[in-house]
Image (cartoon, helix red, strand yellow):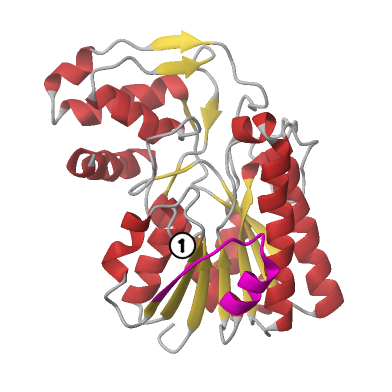
Amino acid sequence: MKSSKVLVTGGAGFIGSNLCEKLLEFGAEVTCLDNLATGHKHNIDPFLKNNKFKFIEGDIRNLETCLQATKNQDFVLHEAALGSVPRSINDPITSNDVNVSGFLNMLVASRDNGIKRFVYAASSSTYGDSENLPKVEDVIGKPLSPYAITKYVNELYADIFNKSYGLDTIGLRYFNVFGRRQDPNGAYAAVIPKFVMQLMKKESPVINGDGTYSRDFTYIDNVVQMNLLCLVTENENALNEVYNTAVGDRTNLKELTQLLKQNLAEYDSDIAEVEIEYGPNRPGDIPHSLASVEKAKKLLNYNPTHGIEDGLKEATHWYWDNL
């Protein structure tokens, strides 16, 4: 990566800032494009002194901004998106503007500026109402939310841009990513940082449903590994594909909450006594999610380093020190 120039969209966000950090460690020249709508300047503050890092405050919904950001770049890691199923149900228009129109702008800009490889954040929500477990990349169901539709459309556009214009793309279907720098605040915070913050305050977390819904919770280091493998792979057969980005194991919400309590109780024993509450299921939520990662192992040499327990140990330690 040493001589490579990489644009990370959404680089001030949770996943994007972790990618920027690792790329800089490997000596790449990194440009971060972010409008700071859901990302945070404090996530990238440590990088601003590095002469190999450049920050552009801008919006992927503006084609000129995308053209400027992709100029003289080798690779794009496209993380910029409006996440959250509930957010997309409450405001489908903005989710579509960012996740579809913004994505298309980035593809056009990448095509016009000769980007070598475009790696983008896809989503496990694309599996929709498919009940098959584990999830394999070529078997999907009907989407269950506007967000899921937008992420599936991304895959369709990426495929067409390869076939029509020769732009090499790789889509990574993220499965419930968690870890350092994931924002615990806001109405659409992910379950792990939200529950961690509540438990640290001795507040009762509310599980949606009876706690039996399960997810393939994936630690950030596994996701960073997948992105970097996509940039450096020389396997032609690995290009223009989509991959599950996960661990290949699942944990239900009741088990997850117990693990969080155990980890946090090491710092404050009173947390072990915090009660858990239960509420209604959320619209658009799928009951179970479990990925097959065999395709990524075979074509990208992916080897996840963190299971749920190791990941939660590191994540809770980070939150304890930083919240």
Q: Position of residue 9 (x, y in %)?
A: 54, 64
**Residue 145 in view (yes/no):** yes
Q: Position of residue 78 (x, y in %)?
A: 58, 63
Q: Quadrant of the N terminus?
A: bottom left
Q: Position of residue 207 (x, y in %)?
A: 46, 17
List the residue tagged with mark 1. 11
**Residue 302 in view (yes/no):** no
Magenta residues, as a range?
Answer: 54-69
Q: Is residue 279 left or right of residue 277?
A: right
- Residue at x 40% of width, y 67% of height: 20
Specify the amino acid type for callout 1.
Gly
- Residue at x 40% of width, y 23% of height: 255
Viewer-proximal residue among 212 and 42:
42
Q: Alpha-carbon neighbours of circle 1 within 10 Å: few (<14), some, or many (≥20)?
A: many
- Residue at x 66% of width, y 73% of height: 64
- In the orientation shown, which residue stands out farthest toward the right? 164
Q: Is residue 317 left or right of residue 45?
A: left
Query: Which quarter of the picture shows residue 209?
Result: top right
Q: Is residue 234 depicted above or below 170 in this figure?
A: below
Q: Is residue 42 left or right of residue 89?
A: left
Q: Position of residue 13 (x, y in %)?
A: 44, 54
Viewer-proximal residue among 144 and 111:
111
Viewer-proximal residue among 37 and 15:
37
Q: Is residue 294 depicted above or below 127 in this figure?
A: below
Q: Is residue 296 depicted above or below 177 in this figure?
A: below
Asked if the stretch drawn in magenta spans residue 60, the answer is yes
Q: Quadrant of the C terminus?
A: top left
Q: Secondary structure at mark 1?
A: loop
Asked if the stretch drawn in magenta spans residue 208, the answer is no
Q: Is residue 118 depicted above or below 275 in this figure?
A: below
